[in-house]
Image: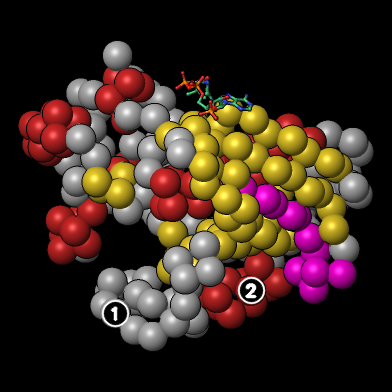
């Protein structure tokens, strides 16, 4: 685990971050809290057999062992999911001195397993795509028995944003266009497919589709524009 952290320091979604931010992060390393290293996208008892089946399917095709971080062969990489986005820059190290200690990533802000956003994402560097298995919980209701459109938008923003980050470095959502084609039942498992459309200067365009696990049903389609930023601009 420590070797994994050491590899991640200095990178944000796999990209180099500025030396000024890095200095401030390193100065904060004494605030390491081992508990904060929890990866929330690991299987838990709330996952349905279907969620677990698809997790096992993609996890078996990963280039890194989820437990040991040792290399193996496969096109996918399972992405860790911490409860602060800044932890992705540091491999999970908690930097309470830098920004609001009580802040939590929206999708990881409820502790009850299975109640809100249960998800795990996988990245395919070669194909520049990301897929996410998403099991929406009972606290995400919009239309009766179905998922709130804002919760679906949140997941689309999160997964496309993760892909943009891996491909283009630190970026923010500038435009998000969504077509809701069919309501998503609460407690079901859907797959969020994201793919790079194109990169133009600072702009990264991502397409996204939310489908049933057999891909026969399309629930949602989206196009998203991310604009690259200097990470330091977020810190004032
Ligand atoms: C692990 C968890 C991952 C979670 C991911 C979640 C990601 C998020 O939700 S981020 C939060 C929501 N987004 C925001 O708060 C962003 C707010 N907006 C901003 O900060 C700024 O408007 C920002 C950075 C997008 C652009 O500002 P700025 O850096 O001044 O760039 P600017 O020159 O205006 O635009 C750059 C290019 O983008 C284009 N652009 C900017 N905004 C838009 C837009 N809304 N629509 C279309 N094009 C746009 C511009 O036209 C310009 O294009 P070109 O280079 O061809 O002339």
Q: Is residue 234 above or below residue 105?
A: above
Position of the N terminus by quadrant: bottom left
Q: Nearer the viewer, residue 164 or 143?
A: 164
- Residue 116 appears anywhere in the view: no
Q: In the image, residue 228 lies at what x, y percent?
A: 43, 34
Whether 158 is among the magenta residues is no
| Residue at x-position 57% and y-position 71% | 55
- Residue 86: quarter of image: top left
What's the magenta region?
206-216
Q: Position of residue 61 (x, y in %)?
A: 49, 81
Residue at the disc numbered 2: 54
Numbered circle sitting on residue 28: none
Expressed as whole percent of the image width and height from the top left, the position of residue 204 reads 53, 43
| Residue 13 appears left or right of 208 | left
Q: Circle 1: is it few (<14), some (14-19), or many (20+) Cα within 10 Å?
A: few
Calculate the distance from the C-alpha at mark 1 to the C-alpha at mark 2: 21 Å
SS for callout 1: loop
Residue bearing mark 1: 71
The residue drawn where x is 62% and y is 53% is 197
Ligand 1 has an atom within 8 Å of the beta carbon of the residue at disc 1: no
């Amino acid at each position: 685990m420590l070797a994994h952290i050491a590899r991640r320091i200095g990178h944000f979604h796999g990209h180099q971050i500025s030396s000024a931010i890095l200095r401030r992060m390193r100065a904060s390393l004494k605030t390491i809290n081992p508990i904060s290293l929890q990866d929330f996208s690991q299987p838990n008892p709330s996952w349905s057999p279907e969620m677990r089946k698809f997790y096992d399917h993609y996890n078996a095709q990963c280039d890194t062992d989820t437990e040991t971080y040792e290399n193996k062969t496969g096109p996918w990489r399972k992405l860790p999911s911490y409860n602060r986005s800044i932890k992705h820059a540091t491999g999970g190290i908690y930097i309470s001195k830098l920004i609001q200690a009580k802040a939590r990533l929206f999708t990881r802000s409820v502790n009850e397993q299975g109640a809100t956003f249960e998800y795990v994402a996988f990245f395919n560097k070669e194909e520049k795509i990301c897929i996410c298995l998403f099991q929406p919980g009972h606290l995400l209701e919009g239309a009766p028995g179905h998922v709130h459109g804002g919760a679906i938008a949140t997941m689309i923003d999160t997964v496309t944003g993760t892909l943009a980050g891996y491909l283009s470095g630190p970026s923010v959502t500038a435009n998000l266009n969504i077509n809701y084609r069919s309501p998503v039942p609460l407690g079901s498992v859907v797959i969020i497919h994201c793919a790079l459309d194109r990169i133009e200067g600072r702009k990264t365009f991502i397409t996204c589709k939310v489908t049933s696990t057999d891909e026969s049903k399309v629930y949602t389609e989206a196009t998203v524009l991310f604009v690259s930023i200097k990470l330091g601009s977020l810190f004032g």
